[in-house]
């Protein structure tokens, strides 16, 4: 009989062989247990002050219409390829601005993953945790950076700028909600950041102080894990309310607002720049609508038309301000799209090969790693697994992906232990 | 402040756990519980916390049995009551209350549906069904049998079909959830092969369980209502992904027990044969078989799983933990206790009220959450039950408790009315823009509709809390966790902050009207934290009010909020 | 159903086409999805644009026609396809992208084509050895469709840059008029049979009626039924995919899909909107009797008075047939392949249809019962 497996057997093979007796298989259980969490951190000195900018092109960016064009082949689509700032490297013509900054990027054209349950959600989780979702939940990469890199206690370590209608996600798993993404839905400030009329600033301080006194009294001679987490959430809230202008992109110069464009993606990229300048450790920007099962070419034309210029502008600005030296930039998507053009002019999900782009801190830029064959149906050279990419994302900012989080007394490797970083991508 | 002293459990009970289990059916379960827990503590030489003070016990038992904190008046009366049997009487009273039924309905809805969005059966219908069941103390096995046997056709039992229907009768999801929720085993990873890490979870268990539901799917009746139908199924074939060529077969199976399926003559299998227009009904229904055999003594895993879940609901942790990981590599913390709990649950005809009564009567439940003096909390693991395990309030508990504490029912009603009238104004404006609209401009408000609109608005406010504090749909509720968005919500959201300022005789307004700061402090602590303040706290309130006398209502509001936002309020301790 | 069987769904005119009897008669094979197809008025050639960089020409006389089955009683649901079709296909290479716009001049000699990177080519000697008369970049970004005026003096092109441009056909890049006003991708363009009016149609379902001579906007026709704004995804979905006038220019048909907001991965329901040209009023929103989750891509008026559309999605491809006075199709033919027909053209014999199929084949259908067969071709009813 045919059934749709809810778990991936290859993953189990790996996990059984390499991790029996280890904590990994039980990570989900640990999250549910909610035991005391004392993540033991392989926090390395040089990793301090590193920042990360993540672009998530949500739905599955087509590699054909972006970084791995195959014009005039059976799979290629109608668009042409154009030369880039890196001689010999071509992008799809839908990315003219990004093509001009290709020397600041490293393009990996040979990323792959096994199929995992849960369609987009599952595949996305694989990309941002480096683990198949059925082994999880594992913390997403933003919370991991927030935990391991964030030095500034006054700021949220991990901010996620999303299209409107995105709610908060529980993406921190066993790292706890302290590190969960703070969601700026539609690029707007977080919900409930305005204090009610009732409390002016002074009285606001008073109520937080009284609250803290009550907690101190309560936590004497009680288990403190819950009360500490609770206190910390109010500390963050009190800080954030004082720094509301952090989220106000209109505080940026008019010239910059024009350069980035008035559409959402432009505003969101400018907001990302602002947050990074103010010292937020990890900023993620999600851009939607790449799930082009229908009208792949129309949607990529639209979406990349929005994405291309502000992305390139932001890269340029980070370079000029010197921030790019300590900021890792990742452009990821949950999977690629099929070489086959579907009846509705669409492309479906493709996990056999797709492209990921890196730049900035710790990355060897100005080149392409890996290749697909002539019509992009399979990897021809240097396959790179999403798990290896996760290690690379860690190592690029000086974190050791082979170190562990300590969860409820057990060591959980930061990156999947059977993988390692892609040396060719790292400086 | 009273300093509790460590209660070193001396061997008042016989130290050997062996002798504890000597069957004494006349021993009340609450004593049996304490014998087991204390025996293990003595054996491991662990100190236990003192018995909880009246206030601590009262708040806990209210939250656990009715889903909300007691109001100030109720709390005061209980604390003043000098009856030595007052705790027992309170437990009995709460179990008989309507709030108990409502609270259990919420708990079991969240447990069984895991906050999935409604599909074919609405949450109000389903919760009403559950509340009636718990109110009438329907035996748990009967309730589960109704859920597992439901087809959605019988109007009276239709809500019970939510478990199947709102999972779209998706086989793999059902197998996983039936296993997890009713048998305490998460078989997901045994779907494609024997479980890679858990030797007890066999590949055939997954498929054996799947046979029961593999023939079932939805059917859309002519009236548009979705119900379940079933085609004949006797066994399924499956092959391990490691040995794809070796096919195995299994009939319906509850873990190790294979069920007999009666032979039916070919051509005579159906009451209604499958067709596009008629709901197919086999003569022998495997779902019915499941509903008869799973929640019964023949499947002891059922009573164990349920006893463990009810225990965890009150004690903050399962005897087997995680709750859906019953297997030999994850042994119970108190094996004999779990045996006794399961046996008593099944021998009492799965009487939930009796079970919860005994649990709450036990000294183990009634322990304080204060760590004994001089003891390192690290030496008292949650699984020892030496100290009361703290639990975060569920989103629903938090909502109801905030409302009780602030005495803001009238404010909430006002908020709801304002929202409704705003909508009505907007609606009228829109209708005015579209003169061709077929709807009459001013519709007569219909009393029933208004009640429903208010219910929906209140539900929407609760839903805000669920989004903020609950688990994601399709995931079980986790333990307490705190986040920045939650803190911002409790600090600044219109819903919460609207209840705090003095208005419509709410708590802040009442306190503002009192002149004596001691009275204010007493009433405040009793209302919000269900206990009296100590002297230090009274002084704190006094000093704060003096400092803020320029705007007394605001100063009161600030101190009210500070307690609402305190960990003591946020946790069930 | 039985009651319907008694009354014929459509009574063919004497010597007219019988759409209910429509059956597959030939397959013109290629290996890339076909996007547009046009019959040569002499009925000798069929021209097509596809998902490659060529314009294709088949010599219809050299292509085998499917033989009727020997035993009509054992007739398969779908007739067999010839195993080794003669390959009469000629490839014309000049374009630098897919060719979505193909329009023939009535002079028998010239042809205009447009591609997805904005190149417009006018070809000569189309029946002999076709070669470009001229070629130039007519749009920034894709050209979606081209249309040649009835007198052959003008060719109109529309594309993703939102512009409608009318070019003179005697030399490269001689702009006759530029019509601006669409605020999104323009998908289709057609000349009115009188040659004085031009209609252009876009993603948002706006049809603009232009005066060809002055280039001025005359009016707008509302076909926004064929457009959905997805609130959830914040995108425009749909658009006018097919558009044509009837022979006397009294009716305008627009094809596409309508539907609720289902995001970007699901089509709405196929619709053909029929407009009264004089008033611009919507006469009928033509549909199938049941919800048809797909798009109508191509549309044609038959001189016998009925309307034909091709379309589909990955779940199925169809030809639909309507009487202009009835909203529900009187007949539907479901394709063997699960893929849409992106374009449909009517042969000069008025009985054969060419359908441009996603799977890389142009299929020819005859709207007539097979000879020597008493019962008409049974086609799928739902």
Image (cartoon, coloured by chain):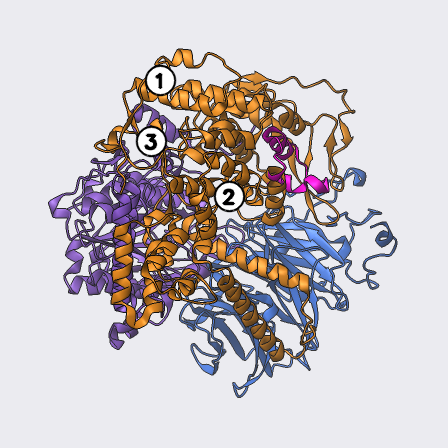
Chain colours: A purple, B orange, C blue
Q: Nearer the viewer, residue B536 or C75?
A: B536
Question: Subunit of mark 3?
Answer: B
Left or right, A18 with respect to B120, comes to left
Q: Residues within 10 Å of mark 3 (few under 14, many from 20)?
A: some
The residue identified by callout 3 is B382
Q: Is residue B150 magenta?
A: yes
Can you tell which of label 3 and label 2 is closer to the viewer? 2
Quick check: C35 left or right of B371? right
Q: Residue furthest front?
A: B82
Residue C97 in sight here = no
Residue C39 among magenta residues = no
The answer to whether mark 1 and mark 2 are in CB contact below 8 A is no
The segment highlighted magenta reads B135-162
Q: Quadrant of residue C348?
A: bottom right
Residue A152 shows in this picture: yes
Q: Earlier in the sequence, mark 1 or mark 2?
A: 1
Residue at image location 56% in from the left, 26% down from the top: B209
Mark 3 and mark 2 lie on one chain; the one further toward the N terminus is 2
In the image, residue A135 lies at what x, y percent? 37, 34
> Which of the labelled discs sits on residue B12, or is there none?
1
* Distance between mark 3 and mark 1 Cα atoms: 23 Å
Q: Chain of mark 2?
A: B
Q: Position of residue B221 (x, y in %)?
A: 73, 45
Q: In this orientation, which residue lies closer to the viewer: B475 or B528? A: B528
Foreground residue among C242 and C97: C242
Residue A397 disc label? none
Dots 3 and 2 on the same chain: yes
Q: Residues within 10 Å of mark 1 (few under 14, many from 20)?
A: few
| SS of the residue under disc 2 | helix
């Amino acid at each position: 009989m045919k059934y749709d497996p809810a778990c991936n057997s290859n993953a189990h093979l790996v996990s059984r062989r390499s991790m029996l007796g280890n904590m990994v298989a039980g990570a989900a259980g640990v999250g549910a247990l909610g035991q005391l969490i004392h993540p033991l951190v392989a926090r390395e000195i040089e990793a301090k002050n590193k920042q990360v900018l993540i672009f998530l092109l949500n739905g599955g960016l087509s590699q054909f219409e972006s970084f791995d064009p195959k014009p005039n082949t059976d799979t290629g689509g109608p668009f042409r390829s154009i030369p880039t700032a890196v001689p010999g490297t071509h992008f799809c013509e839908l990315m003219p601005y990004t093509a001009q900054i290709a020397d600041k990027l490293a393009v990996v054209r040979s990323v792959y993953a096994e199929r995992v349950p849960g369609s987009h959600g599952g595949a996305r989780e694989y990309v941002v945790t480096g683990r198949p979702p059925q082994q999880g939940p594992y913390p997403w990469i933003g919370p991991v950076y927030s935990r391991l890199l964030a030095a500034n206690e006054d700021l949220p370590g991990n901010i996620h700028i999303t299209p409107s209608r995105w709610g908060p996600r529980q993406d921190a798993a066993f790292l706890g909600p302290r590190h969960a993404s703070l969601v700026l839905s539609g690029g707007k400030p977080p919900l409930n950041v305005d204090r009610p009329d009732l409390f002016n600033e002074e009285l606001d301080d008073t109520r937080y102080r009284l609250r803290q006194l009550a907690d101190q009294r309560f936590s004497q001679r009680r288990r403190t894990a819950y009360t500490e987490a609770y206190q910390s959430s109010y500390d963050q809230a009190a800080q954030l309310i004082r720094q509301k202008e952090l989220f106000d992109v209109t505080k940026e110069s008019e010239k910059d607002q024009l350069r980035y464009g008035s559409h959402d993606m432009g505003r969101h990229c400018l907001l990302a720049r602002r947050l990074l300048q103010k010292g937020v450790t990890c900023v993620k920007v999600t851009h939607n609508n790449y799930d082009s099962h229908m009208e792949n070419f129309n949607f990529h034309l639209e979406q990349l038309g929005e994405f291309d210029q502000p992305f390139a502008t932001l890269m340029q600005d980070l370079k000029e301000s010197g921030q790019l030296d300590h900021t890792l930039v990742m452009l990821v998507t949950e999977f690629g799209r099929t070489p086959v053009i579907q009846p509705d002019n669409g492309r479906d999900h493709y996990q056999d090969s797709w492209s990921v782009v890196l730049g900035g801190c710790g990355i060897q830029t100005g080149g392409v790693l890996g290749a697909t064959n002539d019509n992009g149906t399979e990897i021809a050279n240097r396959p790179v697994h999403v798990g290896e990419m996760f290690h690379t994302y860690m190592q690029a900012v000086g974190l050791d992906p082979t170190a562990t989080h300590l969860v409820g007394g057990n060591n959980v490797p930061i990156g999947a232990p059977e993988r390692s970083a892609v040396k060719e991508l790292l400086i | 402040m009273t300093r509790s002293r460590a209660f070193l459990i001396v061997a008042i009970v016989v130290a050997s756990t062996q002798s504890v289990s000597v069957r004494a059916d006349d021993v009340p379960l609450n004593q049996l519980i304490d014998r087991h827990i204390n025996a293990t503590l003595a054996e491991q030489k662990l100190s236990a916390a003192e018995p909880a003070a009246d206030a601590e016990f009262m708040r806990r038992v209210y939250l656990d049995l009715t889903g909300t904190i007691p109001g100030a008046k109720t709390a005061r009366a209980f604390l003043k009551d000098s009856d030595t049997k007052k705790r027992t009487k309170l437990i009995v009273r709460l179990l008989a209350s309507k709030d108990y039924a409502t609270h259990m309905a919420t708990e079991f809805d969240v447990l069984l549906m895991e906050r999935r969005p409604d599909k074919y059966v609405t949450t109000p219908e389903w919760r009403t069904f559950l509340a009636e069941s718990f109110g009438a103390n329907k035996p748990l096995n009967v309730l589960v049998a109704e859920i597992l046997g439901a087809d959605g056709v019988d109007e009276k039992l239709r809500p019970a079909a939510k478990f199947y229907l709102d999972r779209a009768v998706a086989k793999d999801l059902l197998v996983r959830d039936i296993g997890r929720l009713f048998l305490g085993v998460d078989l997901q990873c045994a779907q494609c092969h024997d479980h890679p890490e858990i030797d007890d979870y066999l590949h055939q268990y997954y498929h054996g369980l799947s046979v029961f539901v593999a023939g079932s799917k939805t059917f859309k009746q002519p009236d548009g209502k979705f119900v379940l139908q079933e085609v004949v199924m006797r066994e399924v074939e499956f092959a391990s992904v490691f040995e794809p060529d070796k096919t195995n077969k299994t009939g319906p199976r509850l873990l190790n027990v294979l069920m007999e399926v009666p032979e039916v003559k070919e051509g005579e299998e159906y009451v209604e044969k499958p067709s596009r227009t008629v709901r197919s009904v086999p003569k022998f229904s495997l779902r019915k078989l499941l509903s008869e055999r799973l929640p019964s003594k023949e499947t002891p895993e059922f009573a164990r799983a349920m006893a463990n879940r009810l225990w965890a609901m009150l004690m903050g942790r399962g005897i087997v933990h995680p709750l859906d990981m019953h297997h030999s590599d994850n042994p119970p913390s108190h094996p004999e206790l779990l045996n006794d709990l399961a046996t008593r649950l099944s021998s009492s005809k799965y009487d939930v009220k009796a079970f919860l009564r005994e649990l709450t009567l036990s000294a183990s439940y009634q322990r304080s959450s204060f760590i004994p003096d001089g003891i390192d909390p690290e030496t008292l693991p949650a699984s020892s039950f030496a100290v009361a395990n703290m639990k975060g309030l569920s989103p629903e508990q938090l909502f109801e408790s905030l409302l009780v504490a602030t005495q803001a029912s009238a404010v909430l009603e006002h908020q709801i009315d304002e929202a409704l009238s705003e909508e009505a104004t907007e609606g009228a404006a829109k209708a005015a823009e579209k003169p061709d609209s077929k709807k009459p401009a001013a519709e007569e408000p219909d009393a029933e509709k208004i009640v429903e609109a208010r219910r929906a608005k209140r539900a929407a406010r609760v839903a805000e809390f669920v989004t903020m504090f609950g688990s994601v749909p399709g995931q079980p509720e986790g333990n307490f966790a705190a986040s920045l968005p939650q803190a911002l919500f409790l600090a600044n959201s219109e819903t919460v902050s609207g209840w705090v300022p003095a208005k419509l005789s709410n708590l802040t307004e009442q306190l503002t009207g009192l002149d004596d700061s001691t009275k204010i402090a007493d009433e405040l602590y009793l209302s919000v934290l269900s206990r009296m303040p100590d002297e230090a706290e009274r002084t704190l309130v006094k000093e704060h009010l003096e400092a803020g006398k320029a705007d007394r209502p605001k100063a009161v509001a600030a101190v009210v909020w500070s307690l609402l936002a305190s960990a003591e309020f946020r946790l069930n301790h | 159903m039985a009651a319907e069987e008694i009354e014929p769904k459509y009574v063919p005119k004497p010597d007219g086409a019988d759409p209910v009897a429509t059956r597959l008669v030939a397959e013109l094979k290629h290996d890339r999805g076909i996007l547009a197809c046009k019959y040569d008025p002499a009925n000798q050639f069929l021209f097509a644009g596809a998902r490659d960089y060529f314009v294709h020409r088949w010599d219809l006389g050299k292509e085998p026609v499917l033989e009727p089955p020997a035993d009509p009683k054992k007739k398969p649901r779908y007739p067999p396809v010839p195993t080794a079709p003669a390959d009469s296909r000629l490839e014309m290479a000049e374009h630098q992208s897919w060719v979505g716009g193909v329009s023939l001049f009535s002079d028998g000699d010239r042809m205009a084509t447009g591609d997805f990177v904005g190149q417009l080519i006018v070809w000569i000697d189309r029946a002999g050895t076709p070669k470009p008369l001229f070629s130039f970049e007519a749009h920034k970004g894709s050209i979606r469709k081209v249309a040649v005026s009835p007198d052959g003096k003008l060719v109109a092109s529309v594309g993703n840059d939102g512009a409608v441009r009318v070019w003179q056909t005697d030399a490269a890049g001689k702009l006759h008029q530029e019509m601006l006003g669409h605020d999104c991708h323009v998908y289709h363009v057609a000349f009115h049979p009188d040659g004085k009016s031009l209609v252009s149609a876009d993603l948002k379902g706006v049809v603009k009626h232009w005066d060809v001579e002055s280039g001025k906007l005359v009016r707008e026709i509302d076909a926004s039924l064929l457009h959905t704004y997805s609130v959830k995804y914040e995108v425009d979905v749909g658009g006018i995919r097919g558009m044509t006038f009837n022979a006397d220019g009294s009716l305008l048909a627009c094809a596409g899909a309508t539907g609720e907001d289902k995001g970007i991965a699901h089509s709405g329901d196929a619709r053909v909107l029929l407009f009264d040209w004089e008033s611009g009023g919507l006469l009928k929103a033509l549909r199938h009797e049941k919800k048809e989750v797909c798009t109508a891509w191509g549309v044609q008026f038959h001189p016998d008075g009925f309307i034909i559309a091709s379309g589909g999605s990955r779940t199925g491809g169809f030809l639909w047939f309507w009487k202009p006075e009835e909203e529900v199709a009187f007949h539907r033919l479901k394709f063997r392949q699960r893929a849409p027909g992106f374009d449909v053209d009517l042969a000069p014999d008025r009985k054969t249809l060419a359908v441009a199929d996603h799977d890389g084949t142009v299929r020819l259908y005859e709207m007539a019962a097979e000879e020597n067969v008493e019962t008409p071709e049974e086609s799928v009813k739902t």
